[in-house]
Image: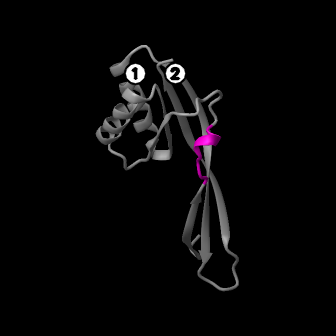
Amino acid sequence: MNNYTKGRCEEEVWQKKNLPIPNLPDDFTWMQVSGGSKIRNLLEAAWKEFNENPSIVWSASGLGLNKAITCAEMTKRKFGNLKQETVVCYREIKEYWDPKIEKLDQLVVIREVPAIHIYLSRE
């Protein structure tokens, strides 16, 4: 790998309609957690929405997994008696490595990073 430099990265894009949780309602709050997210900020926004909307989905991959689980557990503790459905899956990330020497080809490395979706509902 000494002859390559890391180029761009492409993450698989999540869409609200394609979440792998069966029987999701049409209207729900979707919180996408990243490794750099602050738990306090996530919870404030989510709880404000959760008072108006009876269902919420916490989604994260990679370094955000622990934070998403923490947020879901704190939400369950605050609101109590919530229905939970959890799906663990993988998110595909493509890394492009550019050659330093002209005769070499560009490399594409496909990584599958663990991901989680936690659905909480009052119904």
Q: Tell which of 120 and 62 is nearer to you.
A: 120
Q: Position of residue 41 (x, y in %)?
A: 31, 42
Q: Residue at x 40, y 25 (%)?
A: 73
Residue identified by numbered label 2? 84
Q: Is residue 106 above or below residue 13?
A: below
Kindly identify which numbered label has been placed on residue 113: none
Q: Residue at x 64, y 27 (%)?
A: 23
Q: Tell which of 33 and 22 is nearer to you.
A: 22
Q: Tell which of 95 and 102 is nearer to you.
A: 95
> As drawn, is 24 to the left or to the right of 48?
right
Tell me the CA gap for discs 1 and 2: 9 Å
Whether pointer 1 and pointer 2 mark residues with C-beta atoms closer than 8 Å, the reply is: yes
Q: Residue at x 35, y 40 (%)?
A: 42
Q: Which amino acid type corresponds to the residue marked 2 in the rendered image? A: Gln
Task: Give the overall secondary structure of the magenta segment.
Answer: loop
**Magenta region:** 12-19
Q: State the SS at label 1.
A: helix
Q: Which amino acid type corresponds to the residue marked 1 in the rendered image? A: Lys
Q: State the SS at label 2.
A: strand
Between discs 1 and 2, the one toward the N terminus: 1
Q: How was the colour assigned to the protein in this rendering?
A: one colour
Q: Quadrant of residue 114?
A: top right
Q: Residue at x 34, y 39 (%)?
A: 45
Q: Position of residue 50 (x, y in %)?
A: 40, 29
> As drawn, is 79 to the left or to the right of 62?
left
Q: Quadrant of residue 4?
A: bottom right
Residue identified by numbered label 1? 76
